[in-house]
Amino acid sequence: MSSGSLATPVSLRDSHCPSCFLLRVNPVGSFLCHLLGDNPQKWRPLLSVYYLTYACSLRCPYCCDGSGRPYYQLDRKALPASRIGELLRIVRRHSEHLVVTGGEPSEHPECAAVLDDLAALRFRSVILTTNGRTLDTLLPAVQRSVTHLVVSLQTLDSARADSWYGHGAGTHARVLANLERAAALPGRRFEIILSSVVTPENIPDLHEVYRFAKACGFRLAACPQLVGTKAHAGLVDNPEYRAFYDLLISEKRRGGSIQGTVDYLEYLRDLRKFSCRPFTMLVVSPVGEVFYPCLELGQSAGNLLDEPDLHRLRRAGCERFGPQPACDNRCHSACALGFSRLLANPASMLHEAALVARSWLA
């Protein structure tokens, strides 16, 4: 893999991970409503997440939904592109920012068409998460519609990665080659973010992944491996895990391109309990079911195609399942923890604002 094309970063004027940053993501009115107090009669998402498909050809050992099952074992029912377009038009009424994820979204047979259709909906940001294996087939659509491309990368050791992927030799090399293609795309308008799952086995590898991201001008997003909803037991009180996050926090303070505020990274490092704010997000299944109050509990308030009024869906969910439960110490994931800490500590955005100002002046 050559370093020339990868070492030229996209402009960071509109950067930062969409799950954690006020200036790029949160419509001010909705943010203030959440900041002043959640109205149990209303659902005002700051970010929407659509699972395009649960299908995935890889067999990563750290893959896990909230129930403890890997996504590739979930129901593979999916909508055709025409119905997805209808669904996402409804989503757009409720949110200005969208994550398209999976499973592996590229395994939806009409993924490129779905991405192309998003351009007309004019979301302020569209984030595509992918394992990168077939990214080369999507790059024209990504260029037209995506603002943030999130590629999963846990190591630079191809043999180790291929053993985790379970898809045969050469998979990791293809992912790296596709990253290079994406980075070198003429006139690239999207930011590239490397998303790393921190497991007890790969912590040493992640130091190298961060150096790679830094050299290439990519952002790094690192979250602990979850088993169900809880951090892997091998990460709790693990000095290597803590030292890795100490490094990220130190780099972040110096302006490093790392997802999340310092406050957020400290909560990940310590695996501290936080007060979840699930109604800051709208999470939708491949067929349009709206998770209530969150993906991890696996409960549906109804289908957005049948009931496009999100406020009614929240009330229906509350009638069926009760109000938001008080959870224990769990769900240390980017969106759940990011929004919760941002609302609990809005002053943490001051450092983020300073970084944005620095990028404008660079």
Image (cartoon, rainbow, N blue to C red):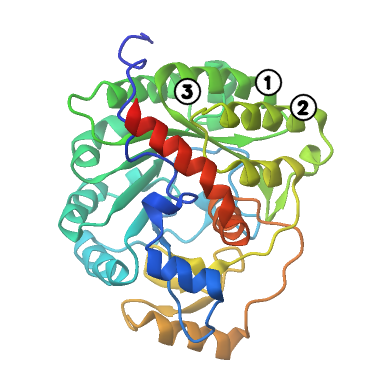
Q: Residue 54 at what x, y percent from top left?
A: 44, 54
Residue 287 visible from this viewpoint: yes
Q: Residue 240 got which mark?
A: 2
Counting other residues with Cα less than 10 Å from the Cα at mark 1, is it few (<14), some (14-19), or many (20 or more)? some
Q: Position of residue 36 (x, y in %)?
A: 54, 74
> Which residue sits at x=49%, y=88%?
316
Q: Secondary structure at mark 3?
A: helix
Residue at the disc numbered 3: 213
Q: How dense is the environment of label 3, judged by Cα within 10 Å: few (below 14), some, or many (20 and up)? A: many
Q: Give the alpha-carbon distance from disc 1 to disc 3, as whole Å.
A: 15 Å
Is the residue under label 3 in contact with that under label 1 (CB below 8 Å)?
no
Instruction: Name the disc covering residue 204, or none.
Output: 1
Q: Of residues 236 and 354, which is closer to you in this image?
A: 354
Amino acid of disc 3: Ala
Which residue ends up furthest to the bottom in the rendered image? Answer: 319
- Can you say whether 319 is above or below 20 in the image? below
Can residue 284 be seen at all in this image of the molecule? no
Could you give the CA–CA distance between mark 3 and mark 2, rounded to whole angstroms?
20 Å
Q: Quadrant of the N terminus?
A: top left
User: In the image, what residue type sits under mark 2?
Assistant: Glu
Residue at 19% from the left image edge and 64% from the top image edge: 82
Position in image of residue 326 (x %, y %): 72, 73
